[in-house]
Image (cartoon, grey):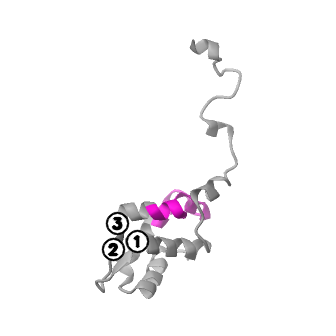
Amino acid sequence: MAHPLKHAESSAKKFGGRAEDYLPIHNWFDESKAFLADFRHRALRHHAEGIFLAEELFGVAIVNSDGKQIPVRYVGEQHVREDLGRIPTAQDWLLQIKPQRWMYGQRLDEETPSKEEFL
């Protein structure tokens, strides 16, 4: 699915209530499109850890417009499965990053201080 509203409509069909009941959760999952507007934005929240973070942010459950309690985790799982077909871990995403020198957080050239310079 390409848009949070479509995910929200799918949630309403699955769990009851109206799409608007679920839109804040689906918007949160896709907020990272503001930084990178292709599939890679999903690496930030579309994984098991992201689903648990959504639960921390939105609570264990929401009450939809039908008055029914719906676990936030179920909504998050639905979102990620609709986009990816499964629920990966954050590690699944991170292992795909090609390391670059700057990612190591230190200079790796001859200007790097030796141990003796710190003593």
Q: Main secondary structure of the magenta part?
A: helix
Q: CA distance from mark 3 to mark 2?
A: 7 Å
> Three-letter amino acid code at disc 3?
Gly
Q: CA distance from mark 1 to mark 3?
A: 7 Å
- What residue is pinned by disc 2? 62
Name the spot of residue 44 as percent of width and height, x first.
53, 57
Quadrant into which the C terminus falls: top right
- What residue is pinned by disc 3? 59
Q: CA distance from mark 2 to mark 1?
A: 7 Å
Q: Earlier in the sequence, mark 1 or mark 3?
A: 3
Q: Earlier in the sequence, mark 2 or mark 1?
A: 2
- What residue is pinned by disc 1? 72
Name the spot of residue 57 as percent of width and height, x first.
37, 61
Determine whether the residue tagged by mark 3 lies in a helix, strand or loop. loop
Q: Are marks 1 and 3 in contact (CB under 8 Å)?
A: yes
The residue under the point 71% across, 21% down is 110
Magenta range: 29-52
| Quadrant in which residue 87 is drawn | bottom right
Quadrant into which the N terminus falls: bottom right
> Three-letter amino acid code at disc 1?
Val
